[in-house]
Amino acid sequence: MFGIGISSGGSFTDAVIMDLKNWHVVSKAKSPTTYNDFSLGIINSLDKVLSSSNVRPEEIGLVSLATTLATNAIIENKGGKVSLILLGFQQSDMLISKPENARDLPVHNIMSFNGGHGPDGIEICPLDLDAIEDGVKRSKDAVDSFAVSGLFSVRNPIHEMTVKRIISRHTNKPVVCGFELAGKLGIYERTVTAVLNARIMPIVERLIMSVKAAMSQRNICAPLMLVRGDGALMNDAVAMERAIETIQSGPAASVIGGKFLSSKEDVVVMDIGSTTTIICSVKAGAPKIDESGATIAGWKTRVRAVDADALGNGGDSWISVDSMGILKVGPRRVIPLAFASKDFPSLKGKMQQFETVDFFSASKAMRRPDAGGLSQKLFDAVLNLEPATIIEIKKELKSTPVDLLIGMLEDSGYMARIGLTPTDLMHVKGLFTLGDVEASMLGTGILAKRLNITQDQLYEKVWDLMVQKNALRLAELQTPLGNMIMENSEKPNPAVEILDSIIRGSLGDISVSCSLNVPIVGIGAPAQFFIPQIAERLKTESIIPQHYEVGAAIGSLVGNVVSTFDLLVRKEVMPECYVVFPGRHVFSDLESAAEFAIKMGKEEAYKQAEKTGAIDIEFKVKREDKVFSKIGFMWSDIRVTATGRPALESKELK
Amino acid sequence: MSTREDILAGLAKAVIDGDPDVSKVWAQKALNAQMDAYEALTKGCQEGMKVVGDRYTAGTMFIPEILLSAEALYSAMDVLRPYIKVQSTVPASVVIGVIEGDVHDIGKNIVKMMLEASSVKVYDLGRDVPIEAFVTKAKETNANVIAMSSLMTTTMFKMKDVVDMLVEQGLRQKVKVMVGGAPTSQAFAQNVGADAYAVDATEAVKAFEKLMKGA
Ligand code: B12
């Protein structure tokens, strides 16, 4: 039986067919990602990969998909209307809890009711059932879904469950509870998680429906699975309920794929895409996970996801010369000349006419609603002139502060810059041929002339900067610095500067040397051009495995189905007892309490894993007792993990 | 004129005897002799309290007597308070209290006094303080730190509830947590998720200062 893995993240949607018996790659394909409707690109790649192999659709037993759809929807603030119900927590409390730079919650309305629990799982205040019923009746027709979040619901979810039941009596619209998605303290983060989940459910559902329809048209009756942010798989039904868990699924698939292809337990995986480089370390076979939850578009969630760094310095980085005449690569991302030239036939002529490589486009960016004012005038001018040079724009709009406004429009996504990029240099070198090579050559010539160097020298310099930047970021992440340094922060950071010098081999008059003690696995189409050099700088081995260019697609197929359940046993006094959470189950001695907790954990984790599409489920129990001198046992954190293989199914099996 | 040793012994005995009038006199003598006020309190009164503790454990002293000892300690403290010298001033605020179920507030009061002497704004919630009260007060006053005291093994676990409450309400990044009291320890503090622990009031001020510098 065979499986199809698809990864739809960057510019390309990759697909592979693997033999599920021996995990050999049978065929692979790439097709452009269709951002307006992801399903089109996904179905294209599905067709392509099927037609390039002898595998019959009837032999497919599993289709697995990693997609950035949910992430994109959240970043673009798309989704349904959500009514948020808070229990034992006020809207004003939410404002206090909200981290300073966080965005406002994307909700249609918020209702706060009495209720919620204390840290001991005891009700603070009973639910006001009548008031809740009234509220639900009032908002049910105006919204698409509900999110319910109660204080300490992770210790005792009974209030959230009760409210869910009340809502379900009045409407079939989806209800998402905080405790269902997150087992950790932090009502703000749980609420964000529940709200975003409720909001993007319809979007993910639509994708799943179109992919499934395409599958059955092609006679594939395999289950469809989606990759979670931690790299595990979930079937379509659970993915629709827990849509938010697909955020970070792209990076997760990359890491899992890189690890799988390298057959190593301890590595750093780098996935070099067209726009970003993803870096994540793997220890003892498991990718590094951010237990506190992924942050997305400024929203802090409680979604467990791989702790992957996205370095915006791939092929689309802007090569520019600053006012001091110094060559810079990034951090801004632009449209490569090679690709822009295909959209704008006049580009090459204008490059020669104005001796420049920098242009602006309005139609390649986000659409601007008619806003009036100066910025609107600028937008219209660019749309009219595009690809527009700054000279033309200034000539058109004489007295307008063009430089200032352009920067603002660019930062807010209403204008896109076109420029020379490493992707263009790769076109010149013949490493890439997808775009217009001539435009790239022209641009390289213009910039080299401006810097008074040869084209080869320009290539060498840019390459050196890019390799160093990637090596430096990787080094930052592998040291304690990684947590402290934000990518692209404008301020020079002395620690980073020192690290940079260390990698280059000298600190003033002192020669230094550093070496990474794990190999770097490179995946993604341009990996072979970068990874060996990055590894050389960090004095470690580089691994470019076979099928590296579709590593993420492979990663989306090889994952397991995993479900975790967290419990707490804590000692209480007067009278002495041991209480198991969630739910407050009281026992007179510790071992009976722990035994019950593990049993309950296994039951819950098993139920969820089975529902998620797993077979051959195995458990792992981690119990951490906190015992202190003088006091003895105080509490125990227990985590039960259920892991299984995805259940396969095909037309032939039936 | 009494010697330093006489004065410290006098203070300790007054606390053991539970005589607030006598302890006041010894405190004044300490000041007259130019003794360090904080030393008089810790090496005098607090040593006396230790003896009281031992005798209580041994069953030779009883609760009513201990209460009188506490009175004696406080009356000496009142005399000494204005003369307590501190190294530094820390412009910050703290919500302090003894955790729910616990009425032992002598230690907490000494810590409070030392913090106030360092110009820290102290919101004192007293003793037997419900866990929500710490959180509510910190929210209301925008305090930098919550400081909790517990003298009993049977109440100290509630400190974790306060930390959990802060985490649950998203306040953990905004408020630092400091714990103290005889049964607590550095390891305990770390495990409940507190930022600092201190064995005594002087260390408490140092720890507080360090917390504020780190912020
Ligand atoms: C005085 C005392 C009392 C007095 C308290 C008066 C008062 N207003 O505080 C009274 C008589 C009321 C009392 C009652 C009881 N007590 Co009593 N009591 C004591 C005693 C003798 C001394 C405590 C004391 O004040 N020490 C002196 C101060 C200065 O030291 P400290 O508190 O440790 O504080 C210092 C540091 O710890 C630190 N610190 C303190 N807090 C903080 C906070 C922060 C943030 C920081 C950074 C530092 C810090 O700085 C302080 C100054 O240097 C102790 C025995 C002992 N040896 O400790 C028993 C003791 C604490 N009590 C005990 C008991 C059992 C009781 C009772 C239950 C008795 C009963 N059967 O009724 C009741 C409890 C009632 C209740 N629910 O709380 C037990 C506790 C056992 C346990 N389970 O842990 C002890 C240990 C006696 C014993 N050996 O059995 N008690």
Image (cartoon, rainbow, N blue to C red):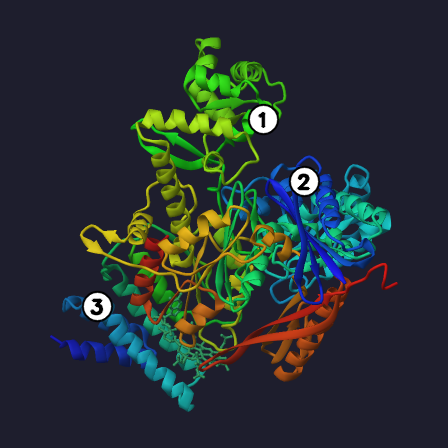
Which of these two is toward me, A621 or A438?
A438
Q: Which element carries disc 1, helix, strand or loop?
A: helix
In the rendered image, which residue does mark 1 sit on?
A342
Q: Residues within 10 Å of mark 2 (few under 14, many from 20)?
A: some
Q: Chain of mark 2?
A: A
Please state which amino acid type lies under the numbered disc 2: Val
In the rendered image, which residue does mark 2 sit on?
A107
| Marks 2 and 1, how far apart at CA | 41 Å
Viewer-nearest of discs 2 and 1: 1
**Mark 1 vs ligand 1: CB below 8 Å:** no
Quadrant location of the C terminus of chain A in the rendered image:
bottom right
Q: Earlier in the sequence, mark 2 or mark 1?
A: 2
Instruction: Check if mark 2 and mark 1 are on a common chain.
Output: yes
Q: Residues within 10 Å of mark 3 (few under 14, many from 20)?
A: some
- State if disc 1 and disc 2 touch (CB < 8 Å): no
Q: Chain of mark 1?
A: A
Q: Which element carries disc 2, helix, strand or loop?
A: loop
**Does residue A96 lie above or below B161 as drawn?**
above
| Marks 1 and 3, how far apart at CA | 92 Å
* Residue B159 position within the rendered picture, expressed as x and y whole percent measured from the top left: 50, 67
Q: Which mark is residue B28?
A: 3
* Residue A290 position within the rendered picture, expressed as x and y whole percent measured from the top left: 54, 58
**Does residue B179 lie above or below A360 as drawn?**
below
Viewer-nearest of discs 3 and 2: 2
* Residue A498 position within the rendered picture, expressed as x and y whole percent measured from the top left: 29, 51
Please state which amino acid type lies under the numbered disc 1: Lys
**Does residue A618 lie above or below A325 as drawn?**
below
Instruction: Check if mark 3 and mark 2 are on a common chain.
Output: no
